[in-house]
Amino acid sequence: MNEKVVLYLIYILSLIFLITLIYLIYRNRKDKKLWGMPKKSHFGIQNSSQFITDIYKFLSNFPITRNYIRKLSYRYRLISPCDRKTIAEKTVCSVLLSWVISILAFFLIFLSNRSLINIITAGIAIFIINSEVVSRMAKKHEIKVLTEMQKMLAEVLHYYYVEYRIDDAIYMARENLSKDMKVAADQIYQLLLSADREESLRQYCDNIPNKFLRAFASLCIGLMEQGDRVIDGKMLFVRNLENLQREIDIEIEKQQRLSMEFMGVILCVVSPIFCIEIVKQFAISLKENMAEFYYGKQGFLLDIGLMAVITGIYVIMRKSAEYPEFHQSSHRWLFIIDRIKLIRKALDNYCDKYASKQEKLQRELRNNGSNIRARHFVLRSFLIALSVFIASTGLAFYLHKSSRKKLLEVNSYEMQFLTPAAKEIQYESMARTIEAYTRKYIEKTTIMPQNTEELTEIFIKDGLVFQPPIAEAIAGDVLNRVKKYQNEHISFIDLFICLCLSIIAYYLPYIFLKYISTVSKDAMEDEVNQFNALIGMLMFNENITVKQILEEMESFSVVFRQSLRMCIDDYGSGDIEALNKLKEREPYEPFRRIVDNLIRCDDMPISQAFAELQADYEGYISKRKLANEKSIKKRVFRAYVLAVVPFMLLFSYGLMPALVSSVKEINELLADLENMTW
């Protein structure tokens, strides 16, 4: 790749970014002049807020950043019940901070050594920095919101004991809440004052994705509609509110533990990427002639392989640290490709031939919380394989071209490894001789001598005077370079290797899915525990129905969401049949026990069907916390095992090539000693 082209591209993108920034500032000032100067005390805040809103609108409509901004804003919307303006501010702040750090990292890495491998390293650094900064900021905000939600529930519970009216309790509690929780309290307060509370609750649940706020709103509506009851000597609403607080406590503890544990592990995983150059220099200091290996074709391929493995481990690590999918992709591009007649026919034939495998794959995808269809998963795997084949073939062409160019460039410091008979003052003339004759015989292969003796005689005829050992070494190096140059072209072996890499790339999504399935088992257990806690809060509501319980379960679910949605859709055509189909779709035994209890609700009250939940609730909470602790430890243990791999690879990268080269040289020396006549 031409370094000037890369630099020009960087300059153009920087100029576009600068022009966009100037345009937004100009439009903001123009709007200010048009509508008049705001009050002095609020000028700075309004000006800054409007500027951030303009950036958000621009990025949301810009084709390249549109989907990225929507995913990030959806994540903040899922965490916090803020208005659009606040979500826009949080999104833009996260994006700008991430991009600024990424740009700085790119320039620091690339400008230190402008090469293709550094461009790839900088690209990986941008991907990791962007992922980590955005995830850390969102996770920090999520934990903060959960903590503030705890405070809100405690305040509401306090004022409920004072007034015994939930609307008054929420109204008085809002004065002590943060900005985000005031918004949530106002929304729920308006919900309680609405004429049709059930319809308002349905709209609220459609617009607010936060599962804990939806559960709290549902409890408040139930209290307003039916009043409170005393169960086992305790008011039902107070009991349910305390249970909801326990659930939030468990969630806060889980998020804090995962964030803390994975922070160090992820740092250990990605740090070897930025230590490759240091390890190279260390290996070269141990054995100087290794520079040709590390900065040649083999070293480049090793660099690419090492970075690819570490990046893959990082992606798996990030998936383990944050299981829930915050934004389900629509996979529109897969639907568009699937409409192509030839591809659609091939996929239909494949799915018909391997119908049982496709059904099993679809079940695994559903258990992992993915909304991609099995046929599209196969199509995506094929497209990944095709992309890897094209990229690896292009890389092979680049490496051969780069190797040819390197063979034509001779550096004087390389002469010290050519022959020990040469002196330092001869290095420059030797390098010029090798380069000149290499270029000559590459251009005119018909006049190239067949052996070193003939080329040595040509040196003498051309007036080049070198000692015989030096002349022979130069001649051998020239012939070796010409031979290598002629062999540096794309071959069948290269294409076969590219094909093997594409086959490996085809199966990588399956391997990744298998690994994530082990994580999803922990997520299944966690979700079932959440379902039990949720049903424990709803079971004493006399007007609650099984369908409403399923809808509440869906709002808390990630892994079982698709199956629950299908069950809810089929519920009108037959409740028992829909629940039985749900059991068939989800073979996870603890979840099937919940479905069995829901089926029993057709013959008995819900509180009686789920009586086992209240038999030893405190013991259940203890088991829940213990299961949560085990789940976190499993994830962290798997992460520690994976974190060892990059360091082992980096250690092998630094020592194995030098060790292999040394063993090879020792064997050659022993062979020379054996052939030597004494």
Image (spheres, grey):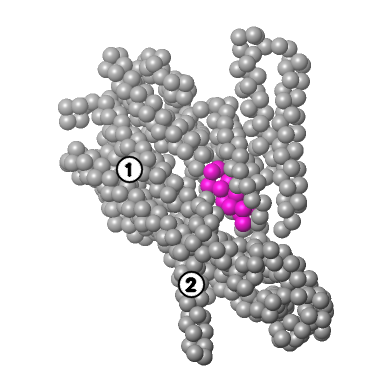
On screen, residue 574 above or below 303: above
What residue appears at the point 49 percent right and 85 percent down from the top-left corner?
673
The residues bearing labels 2 and 1 have C-alpha atoms spaced at a distance of: 60 Å
The magenta stretch spans which residues? 117-130
- Tell which of 490 and 365 is nearer to you: 490
Q: Which mark is residue 662?
A: 2
Q: Secondary structure at mark 2?
A: helix
Q: Secondary structure at mark 1?
A: helix
Callout 2: 10 Å neighbours few (<14), some, many (20+)? Answer: few
- Tell which of 164 and 394 is nearer to you: 394
* Picture coordinates of residue 501, whole percent (x, y): 56, 70
Q: Which mark is residue 530?
A: 1
Question: Is residue 365 rendered to the left or right of residue 21?
Answer: left
Q: Are marks 2 and 1 in contact (CB under 8 Å)?
A: no
Residue 315 visible in image: no
Question: Is residue 573 rendered to the left or right of residue 580?
Answer: right
Callout 1: 10 Å neighbours few (<14), some, many (20+)? Answer: some
* Main secondary structure along the magenta-highlighted residues: helix
* Picture coordinates of residue 295, whole percent (x, y): 61, 62
What residue appears at the point 64 percent right and 75 percent down from the top-left corner?
495
* Picture coordinates of residue 224, whole percent (x, y): 36, 23
What residue appears at the point 49 percent right and 40 percent down from the top-left corner?
135
Residue 216 visible in image: yes
Q: Residue furthest top?
A: 40
